[in-house]
């Protein structure tokens, strides 16, 4: 049975609930497996979606062997929502809490973060500092937490005297001030005010606090390398993008449709972010609209840049790409892609998870490997995949909504 989402999640993602929810992650023993791999012409360059839903039986192609490094069923995870890694440690955000695994030949469970009683969902990836300390939000009374690499609690904060915990439960914290502070945003409280908090990374005490009236922040918080905090908000059906540095008063930068996902600062200095109306925007430093592309589906995950091209997963559409110069590049259409974002390896291969199996069925899930719009291989998972795949140590790490974890080789197909 699917768990209930936190109230802030329901408010901000009412239409997402109608889509469905799955989850994902990874881990296990050594083994190998066979998958179907096809080469599919997906090199469409129009800004909108190409014809066809891309979710039916795979077309004829060349069958290859995908290297399954390991696979393990971890039912205690329930649904896996996000992955992060540091060194040989994998951080799994799941319905039942935060779990750490050792990534080695024989993968091992390292530890789990104390939940303070009942297990509480963790929806966003952990943010990890240079010392291996993890920071994450969760839907509980103490909703912003920090643990060390051994799962020992460092601090837990939240509640009515600090900020509404459930309102922050699907936002990934960001490190600012050279890692000495943690930034997190919340959806609207009872007065309709969103909060942007900065807390000290060492003890969780308040560093700074800003309020945005008649506003809600839903997952859309990004920290650039220079410490600028980009906050995408929702204001009466309109999306307003703000910037803040050093805890300063947020300054309005750009307006579009509602923002439900983080963005990314790309190599030419522009900020790229997607909106609820299916558009991907490049915004200049002064707030100018540099370019806009129709991604074909609602954008609820962060875009990524690889080789001068921005890639984003669009819900119920697939993968949409746009080059930095303003031209649409290629699309990969698959309407079973829902919540998963895109991950890209060093060779330019893009990976995305889906809520249907590789032949279009609805009982399992699938991981697609795509290069320049062409499908290189597709790997069936036991259950749907919601979490964005993670590329780490030459592995594609994946998890499904049944708690099974997978490690696939990045070079699984030619």
Image: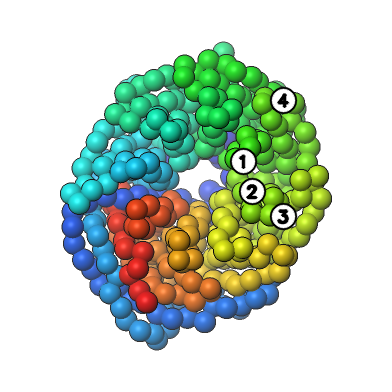
Does 160 sit above or below residue 284? above
Counting residues from the start of the chain, the first of labels 1 and 3 encountered is 1
The residue singled out by tag 4 in the image is: 248
Counting residues from the start of the chain, the first of labels 3 and 4 encountered is 4
Return the x and y of residue 68 as percentages of the image width and height. Answer: 26, 63
Of marks 2 and 3, the one in the foreground: 2
Residue 228 in the figure: left or right of residue 300: right
The colour style of the image is rainbow
Foreground: 104 or 220?
A: 104
Report, in whole angstroms, how far the alpha carbon at label 2 lies from the one at label 1. Answer: 7 Å
The residue singled out by tag 3 in the image is: 282
Q: Residue at x 31, y 63 (%)?
A: 409
Q: Residue 46's quadrant in the figure?
A: bottom right
The residue singled out by tag 1 in the image is: 224
Foreground: 195 or 120?
A: 195
Q: Are marks 2 and 1 in contact (CB under 8 Å)?
A: yes
Neighbour tally class for label 3: few under 14, some 14-19, many 20 plus, Cα within 10 Å: many
Neighbour tally class for label 1: few under 14, some 14-19, many 20 plus, Cα within 10 Å: some
Q: SS for tag 2?
A: strand
Q: Are marks 2 and 3 in contact (CB under 8 Å)?
A: no
Q: Residue at x 53, y 73 (%)?
A: 372
Q: Residue at x 39, y 20 (%)?
A: 154
Q: Are marks 4 and 1 in contact (CB under 8 Å)?
A: no
Counting residues from the start of the chain, the first of labels 2 and 3 encountered is 2
Counting residues from the start of the chain, the first of labels 4 and 1 encountered is 1
Counting residues from the start of the chain, the first of labels 2 and 1 encountered is 1
Q: SS for tag 3?
A: strand
Does 163 sit above or below residue 375? above
Report, in whole angstroms, how far the alpha carbon at label 3 lies from the one at label 4. Answer: 24 Å
Task: Give the label on residue 265, or none.
Answer: 2
Report, in whole angstroms, how far the alpha carbon at label 2 lies from the one at label 3. Answer: 9 Å
> Is residue 339 something one can see in this rendering?
yes
């Amino acid at each position: 049975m699917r768990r209930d989402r936190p109230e802030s999640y329901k408010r901000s993602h009412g239409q997402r609930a109608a889509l469905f929810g799955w989850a994902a992650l990874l881990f296990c023993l050594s083994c190998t497996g066979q998958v179907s791999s096809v080469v599919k012409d997906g090199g469409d360059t129009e800004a909108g979606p190409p014809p066809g839903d891309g979710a039916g039986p795979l077309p004829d192609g060349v069958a290859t062997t995908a290297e399954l490094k390991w696979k393990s069923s971890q039912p205690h995870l329930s649904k896996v929502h996000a992955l992060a890694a540091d060194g040989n440690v994998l951080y799994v955000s799941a319905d039942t809490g935060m779990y750490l695994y050792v990534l080695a030949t024989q993968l091992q469970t390292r530890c789990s973060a104390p939940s303070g009683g009942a297990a509480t969902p963790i929806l966003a990836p952990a943010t990890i500092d240079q010392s291996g300390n993890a920071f994450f939000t969760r839907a509980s009374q103490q909703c912003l937490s920090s643990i060390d690499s051994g799962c020992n609690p460092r601090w837990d904060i939240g509640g009515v005297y600090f900020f509404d915990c459930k309102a922050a439960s699907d936002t990934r914290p960001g490190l600012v001030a050279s890692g000495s502070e943690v930034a997190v945003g919340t959806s609207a409280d009872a007065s309709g005010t969103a909060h942007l908090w900065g807390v000290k990374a060492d003890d969780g005490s308040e560093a700074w606090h800003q309020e945005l009236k008649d506003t809600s922040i839903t997952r859309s918080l990004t920290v650039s390398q220079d410490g600028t905090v980009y906050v995408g908000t929702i204001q009466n059906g309109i999306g307003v993008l703000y910037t803040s540095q050093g805890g300063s008063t947020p300054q309005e930068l750009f307006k579009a449709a509602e923002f439900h996902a983080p963005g990314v600062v790309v190599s030419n200095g522009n900020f790229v972010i997607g909106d609820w109306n299916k558009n991907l925007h490049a915004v200049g430093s002064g707030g100018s609209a540099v370019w806009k592309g129709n991604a074909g589906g609602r954008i609820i995950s962060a875009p990524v840049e690889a080789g001068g091209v921005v890639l984003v997963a669009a819900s119920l559409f697939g993968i949409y790409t746009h080059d930095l110069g303003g031209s649409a590049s290629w699309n990969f259409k698959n309407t079973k892609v829902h919540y998963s974002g895109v991950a890209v390896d060093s060779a330019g291969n893009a990976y995305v998870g889906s809520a249907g199996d590789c032949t279009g069925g609805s009982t399992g899930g699938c991981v697609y490997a795509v290069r320049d719009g062409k499908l290189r291989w597709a790997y069936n998972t036991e259950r749907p995949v919601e979490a964005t795949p993670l590329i780490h140590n030459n592995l594609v790490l994946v998890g499904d909504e049944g708690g099974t974890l997978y490690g696939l080789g990045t070079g699984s197909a030619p």
